[in-house]
């Protein structure tokens, strides 16, 4: 038997020990002096589940705290089978955990998982030097309409239908969660997650800020962004709002690129 075939049989056994091809794998294993071949293989099968379960537990501690250990362990076992790892790093195993919980109709838990996953990925995101206020002031006023912004690579936007941030903070602080906090909101709210130096931040954002960030991510120029914002607020308020928001982002070190569109050609 070739090594690649042996590896394939071993992989199939890890995921399903009842697979008919398991007998072929067992025939290749030396009989241990004490336990059985099945016992020897089970060490690896059980160890695989246990290791990935530990990773999910470290990635989603608040989901575990909210749901309870027994239910969380059940979810981990099911999830590992439904979404087997295709990555070299075990840290990426939880990439679909929020979707998995959503499909099971655990909607608040799904949003908590999405937030924890975003925080984890923000830690590992690439870095870029922030733009300063001086960089902004160096752009001629007549070129402002053609500015194209870039945001920090760690920036992510999540939309929540529940009071997810309140619940998450209560879980972090070991506070009692009230029924009011777990209710579904009448209007969804957005949250931005980003990294400033080595610290992760997350804050609720207004619909206008959400539109602004989405427009930046779509590579729209500043004048086009202002047109979109004018659909949500009085036109005479747009520029002042936009400048104020940009200054806030500069303090948050969220803007890492600042170019005029004709210079990109």
Image (cartoon, rainbow, N blue to C red):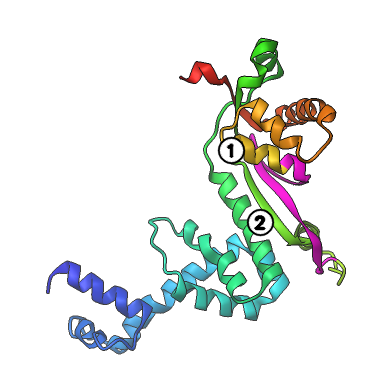
When asked about the image quadrant of residue 155, the answer is top right
In the rendered structure, which disc, 2 or 1, sits on the residue that comes first in sequence? 2
Image x and y of residue 263, in percent: 51, 16
On-image quarter of the N terminus: bottom left
Residues at discs 2 and 1 in contact (Cβ within 8 Å): no
Q: Does the magenta stretch include residue 204?
A: yes
Reply above or below: 74 against 183.
below
Q: Is residue 263 magenta?
A: no
Left or right for 205, reference 224: right
Which residues are the magenta region? 181-209
Reply above or below: 38 against 155.
below
Look at the image and tell me whether residue 34 can be seen.
no
Q: Residue at x 63, y 59 (%)?
A: 114
Q: Main secondary structure of the magenta part?
A: strand
Reply above or below: 19 against 179.
below
What mark, if any, has residue 217 been given in the picture?
Answer: 1
Look at the image and tell me whether residue 229 can be seen.
yes
Foreground residue among 216 and 145: 145
Density class for disc 2 (Cα within 10 Å; few <14, some 14-19, many ≥20) is many
Dot 2: element: helix
Q: Which residue is drawn at 66% across and 56% down?
A: 115
Q: Residue at x 66, y 10 (%)?
A: 140
Q: Mark 2 points at which residue?
A: 115
Q: Which residue is drawn at 52% across and 38% down?
A: 126
Image x and y of residue 245, in percent: 76, 31
Foreground residue among 131 and 42: 131
């Amino acid at each position: 038997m070739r090594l690649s075939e042996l590896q394939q049989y071993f992989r199939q056994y890890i995921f399903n020990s009842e697979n008919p091809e398991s007998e072929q794998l067992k025939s290749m294993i030396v009989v241990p002096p004490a336990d059985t071949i099945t016992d020897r293989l089970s060490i690896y099968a059980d160890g695989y589940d246990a290791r990935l379960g530990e990773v999910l537990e470290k990635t989603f501690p608040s989901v575990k705290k909210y749901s309870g250990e027994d239910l969380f362990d059940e979810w981990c076992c099911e999830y590992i089978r439904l979404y087997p790892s295709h990555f070299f790093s075990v840290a990426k195993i939880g990439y679909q955990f929020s979707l998995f919980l959503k499909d099971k109709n655990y909607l608040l838990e799904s949003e908590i998982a999405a937030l924890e996953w975003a925080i984890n990925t923000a830690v590992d995101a690439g870095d870029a030097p922030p733009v300063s206020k001086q960089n902004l002031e160096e752009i001629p006023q007549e070129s402002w309409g053609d500015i194209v912004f870039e945001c920090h690579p760690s920036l992510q936007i999540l939309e929540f239908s529940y009071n997810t941030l309140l619940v998450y903070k209560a879980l972090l602080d070991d506070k009692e969660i009230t029924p009011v906090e777990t209710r579904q909101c009448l209007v969804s709210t957005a949250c931005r997650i980003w990294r400033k130096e080595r610290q992760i931040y997350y804050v609720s954002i207004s619909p206008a800020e959400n539109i602004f960030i989405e427009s930046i991510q779509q590579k729209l120029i500043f004048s086009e962004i202002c047109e979109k914002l004018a659909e949500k607020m009085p036109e005479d308020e747009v520029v002042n709002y936009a400048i104020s928001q940009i200054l806030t982002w500069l303090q948050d070190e969220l803007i890492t690129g600042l170019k005029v569109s004709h210079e990109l050609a």
